[in-house]
Amino acid sequence: MKKKPIEYVEISTNILKKFDNRLHFDIYVQRTDTDYTKIFKVNDTIDWDRLASYEKKGVKSIFVPQDQYGKYLLFVELLVDKLLSSNNVSALKESVTIVKEMINGCLVEFLSRDVVNETMALQASKTVSSCIEVMDKDTGALTKIIGQMVTKPYLFKHSVTVSLLSILLARGSGIESNSTLNIIGLAGLLHDIGISRLSFDPEDKQQMTPEEQKEMWRHPEIGKRLLDPVKSIRTEILDIVLQHHEQPNGHGYPNGLRTAEIFLPAKIVSIADTFSAMIIKRSYREEYSTFEAINRMKNDVGKFDKNLLLNFEKIILGNKKEES
Ligand SMILES: [Fe+2]
Ligand SMILES: [Fe+2]
């Protein structure tokens, strides 16, 4: 029987540099599109001179095999815990980079695996908690994390942006409980997971066919179904994923719910979702400025919860006036 080729996931060299122990995973460099060479193996201690010599030769990226990726993520989690518990400024800076790596890690898993499992869900929840903790210490961390995502594909950037903006809006609307913020942030991160399971990539399409549009409208249900079997994913998260395209005026999908029937956190994610879709550059159009995005949303009367949108405007624009 033909062996399935091993898949590899890129990891951060900067984070590896914090590793001062024996490795729990193998490390590879990429020779060609399909050819990888193992440079360190489990139980090795890293030979920094050798790693530096690879970097000198132009090796920019290092990889771990997909089946050992969880072990790498575990190390990243421990590292961020350590940094967040110390209160100095440079540790906080480093935490931002590491949280980005955690987000990277959990999204790679969620967007590429056929099924969602308990470990992935717990890792994602831990990632969102670390995001909240970083934001607690530095409110500007949000822009830094989003800014570092520039090279990522759209769905990736969008998921991160929606998660972080949802947490901000929830906070700005008086939600203080960490467990509720975690639910909202996690739902923001996973709200479009159904899109990664469609038969086409909507990012390739400026215009969808009627059949594709119909399939697209099913992504909230597909997402909910995918997450449903995972015990640690709470029902509130499933509700948000299912309802993030509902609108208070009843014109949303999949169920055309009206304002009182829509779960408040779903209204929060809906605002973050639309805003994020507008401020990120798409394959078929330039990004909108934050000012223009907010204005367009305000003009879409009935699509969003009015009070939440006002809070959101305050958070995003503050006292900023239109720059022109
Ligand atoms: Fe969506
Ligand atoms: Fe979305």
Image: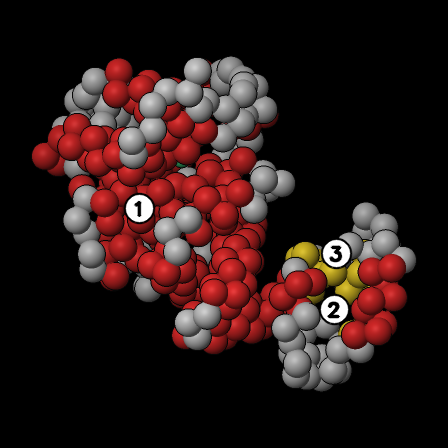
The three-letter amino acid code for the residue at tag 3 is Ser
Residue at 41% from the left image edge and 33% from the top image edge: 276
Kindly report which numbered mark, 1 or 2, lies closer to the viewer in this rendering. 1
- Sequence-first tag of 3 and 2: 2
Residue at 33% from the left image edge and 59% from the top image edge: 136
The three-letter amino acid code for the residue at tag 2 is Ile
Q: Which residue is mark 2?
A: 27
Within 10 angstroms of label 3, few (less than 14), some, or many (20 or more) residues? some
Note whether residue 67 is visible: no
The three-letter amino acid code for the residue at tag 1 is Leu
Instruction: Name the quadrant where ligand 2 sits.
Output: top left
Give the number of the disc on residue 61.
Answer: 3
Relative to 160, residue 183 above or below: below
Outermost residue toward the left in this view: 260
Question: Toward the viewer: 246 or 215?
Answer: 246
Residue 99 position, x and y percent, is 49, 59
Relative to 140, residue 266 above or below: above
* Label 3 to label 1: alpha-carbon separation: 33 Å
From the viewer's perspective, tell me whether residue 247 is left or right of residue 69. Answer: left
Residue 212 position, x and y percent, is 47, 23
Q: Which residue is mark 1?
A: 168
From the viewer's perspective, tell me whether residue 187 is left or right of residue 288. Answer: left
Kindly report which numbered mark, 3 or 2, lies closer to the viewer in this rendering. 3
Residue at 31% from the left image edge and 19% from the top image edge: 295
- Sequence-first tag of 3 and 1: 3
* Label 1 to label 2: alpha-carbon separation: 37 Å
* Label 3 to label 2: alpha-carbon separation: 10 Å
Secondary structure of the residue carrying numbered label 3? loop
Question: Toward the viewer: 3 or 65?
Answer: 65
Note whether residue 288 is visible: yes
